[in-house]
Amino acid sequence: MVLVSKPKNTTGGLKAIFGLLTVVTFLFCNYIITSSNESNSLSSSIQRLENTNRDLEKANEELKKKNENLVYDIDELRDANEKLQNDLRNKNQELESMSRQVQQQQSEATQVSNAVRQKKWDNWPAVAYEQVGKPLVFKGDSFYNHARELYFQPQSNGQTLFDEFLNVYKDRPDPVNMCGIRINHAMALFLAVKHLQPSLVIESGVNQGVSTYFIRAASNTTKIFAIDPKEKPICDQGERWIDQSNLTVNYTGENFTDILDLDWKSMVDKKEIDPDSTLVFLDDHLHAFKRIASVMKLGVRHVLVEDNYKNGEGATRLDRNSTPKQMLSASKWKKEGDWLFNNIVTYAEFPPLIPPIMAKESPEPKKSRGGFMVATDLNEDIAHPILRPDLNEDDMKLFKDAVAKLDLDPTLVDRNSYMQFMNYNQFCHIEFLPMPPSLLYQ
């Protein structure tokens, strides 16, 4: 018997193989997929890296440019800083130089402030000090300090102010004017009115009217208040000269009203007078210092004092104890002198026309009350004369021409010639500081 082998059952093996193949295929596919994903991911990462690298390169380029610009800016800043440093050094040097100059100026100013201003003249013993307590005091630069220049400089008509004055003086109402002003004081009054051109002159002390005559001759437009308690002149001088213009008001005799009793406030309010342009002329032998202080409180800026006696001199008791010169020079009135000095802009004494030595042939004695110069005067307390005929030939000619015009004697040997030229009393001009409105009329 032929045995025929029964075929083995292969289905299970095939299934196993198929299953294995399936697993392998799955794994392979999964590997392929995974590899593909990883490859894609890697490619994507590489792409991102490349993009990042490009961005970095771009940023780097930008940084390079910014760095280059920054380097350029730093160079510019460095240059600017160096320039600024140089400028600062230069400015510091300039400031140091200016500081040294300021210190020098301050030092010089201190020296000047500590040093009293003085005025000295050649061949003249007096020294004027801008300080209280000296024999001859001045303050500021008054026009009286330029009297020679103002009187003798040629005018447009070829004449001088001195020529004009001599014509006026020659025709004065009283040729002698025994108790009034003569050539030196007339020149002082005439020049003050000419120079200041006041809208009003208040004359306290008229007597014969000669000073009123000179005021009107110096200005035909100024108003004049002529004040005198007496109806007629003293010293037997005859009739008083009266200005006939309607610009002069005479407060004399029965119409007398003292300068301090005028209704100033009312007149100022009505604009009848202007204190700023008013000139007060004191020739009344009253207490000059008190009257000056009172007038100042009325707002007046300019005052003339005719009887400005030296210390120890004076025609009356009040003259010997009240003049500006006495207040400014004598130690016993130092408080008054300091007050006056500190409240004025200028103070100056009008210089005499000629020096006392020109009267060396005159027999007239020195007067104890003062008011007249004599040849033996020491001249330590009066300003340098306008003319020096004793030293200068041109001045001698001017003096002789003036004397001839006035029919006087140049030797001054006769009494009238002596009195005309040697009557001198330190006639002064004072300019006050402005009075505060709250103190007016107090």
Image (cartoon, helix red, strand yellow):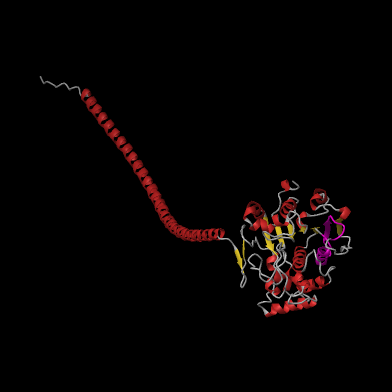
Magenta residue check for 380? no
Which residue is nearer to you in this view: 442 or 28?
Answer: 442
| Residue 412 placement (x, y as % from top left) | 74, 75
Rendered residue at 36%/41% (across/down): 44
Q: Is residue 126 above or below residue 274?
A: below
Image coords of residue 60 (percent x, y): 38, 50
- Quarter assignment of residue 431: bottom right
Count of all numbered marks drawn on residues in the image: 0
Q: Over which residues does the magenta segment extend?
A: 206-233
The front one of 168 and 79 is: 168
- Estimate the x, y position of residue 358 in percent, counting from the top left: 70, 74
* Residue 32 occupies quadrant: top left
Please tell me whether residue 209 belongs to the stretch shown in magenta.
yes
Counting from the top left corner in percent of width and height, residue 407 is at 80, 76
Tell me the quadrant of the picture where the N terminus can be found.
top left
Question: Which sits in the foreground, 31 or 335?
Answer: 335
Report if residue 381 is visible in the image. yes
Residue 162 lies, with reference to residue 104, above or below; the image says: below
Query: Is residue 366 left or right of 65 when viewed as pictured?
Result: right
